[in-house]
Image (cartoon, grey):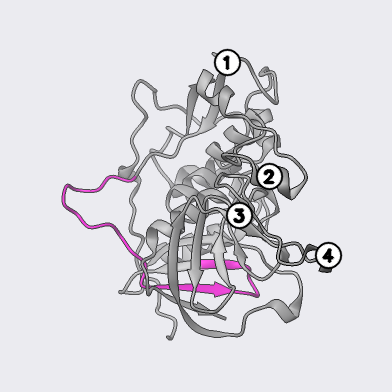
Amino acid sequence: MKHIVIFLLLTSCAAFAAPPGAAARLPHPAGNILALQICLDRRGFSVNAMDGRCGRKTDVALATYCAVRGIPFPTRRQQPNAWESLFPGETNLFTTILVTPEDRRAIVRIPRDPAGKATMTAMGYQSLLEMYAERGRVTEATLRALNPKVRWPNPPVGSAIELPYFPQPKREKGEPPVLADVLRVSLARREITAFDSKGRLLALFPCSIAAEKNKLPPSGEIQVSTLIPNPNYTYKPDAPSAGRQKYIYPPGPNNPVGLAWIGLTLPTYGIHGTPWPEQIGRAESHGCFRLSNWNAVRLRELCDIGTSVVIE
């Protein structure tokens, strides 16, 4: 399938309202680059785990957004002051949550050995720092910087935590969900883009690809074959002494394939989440395409069985 020109952004600034009880506010002291990254992510132009810094992923997301909108791309020098002009009137960028007993009880210790992992009921988060960083789509260092007085990694119940705010886009009653017609996987740029049937860009996600060149998939068009939320994972040891031994790891954010699995018609290949979101964008997977958990969930919701996937 040939590339279709991007010409429209689907989501407008007006689609995002302040959370109940939260006043609109100016960007957090963490910096205007973080504000820029939040605004881009809200519109589907992900920089992966946000860190408040200018970098390649931010450049790519911003350049793509500007191309879609038909506006000039701000230089690195201009970027720290660009968010207000690019996203006027959008100031409700953060929200405050409280640590709950349920969050504390959800923390787990994950054994190192496969047999121990297979006995778990869920491969949950190993700290509240990990949990809230993923919830806010930020690096753990950024979460610490946003909340310098919090007792990390596991603050007590009732502690106030400030996070980037990501409201659900509004949809009219009876309006069908927006679905992708084609996904394009760029091995060179290490990114996945999703387009609707009219060629409009729905989302851009940084991804990781195979570390070994012989495990990279061939270029061409395939399809989505399965969509699994909260998948389990079957681990088969490579050692000859293991024989047919296998271990089934339970679902959870620290499952090796994360919170979503998008199976492909190319055998053994898929798109999935990961326990290590800050490593996304590298060539390090065993062949599949890794996304951060939150982006894997977002992409799964955009797909259907049979959605076209173009590897290039």
Question: Which badge, 4 or 1, is on the more N-terminal residue?
Answer: 1
| Residue 274 position within the rendered picture, expressed as x and y whole percent measured from the top left | 62, 53
Identity, as a three-letter code, of the amino acid under mark 4: Ser
Q: Give the range drawn in magenta.
A: 169-192
Question: Which badge, 3 or 2, is on the more N-terminal residue?
Answer: 3
- Look at the numbered disc 4 and give the secondary structure of its residue: helix
Using the rendered view, name the quadrant where residue 112 is placed: top right
Question: Which badge, 2 or 1, is on the more N-terminal residue?
Answer: 2
Kindly identify which residue carries mark 1: 159
Kindly identify which residue carries mark 4: 241
Identity, as a three-letter code, of the amino acid under mark 1: Ser
| Residue 59 position within the rendered picture, expressed as x and y whole percent measured from the top left | 61, 58
Q: Which of the numbered marks, if any, corresponds to residue 117?
A: 2
Kindly identify which residue carries mark 3: 58
Question: Which badge, 3 or 4, is on the more N-terminal residue?
Answer: 3
- Look at the numbered disc 1 and give the secondary structure of its residue: loop
Identity, as a three-letter code, of the amino acid under mark 3: Thr
| Residue 22 position within the rendered picture, expressed as x and y whole percent measured from the top left | 39, 23
Q: Distance between the residues labelled 3 and 4?
A: 46 Å
At a point 42% along the width and 65% down the height, the residue shown is: 68
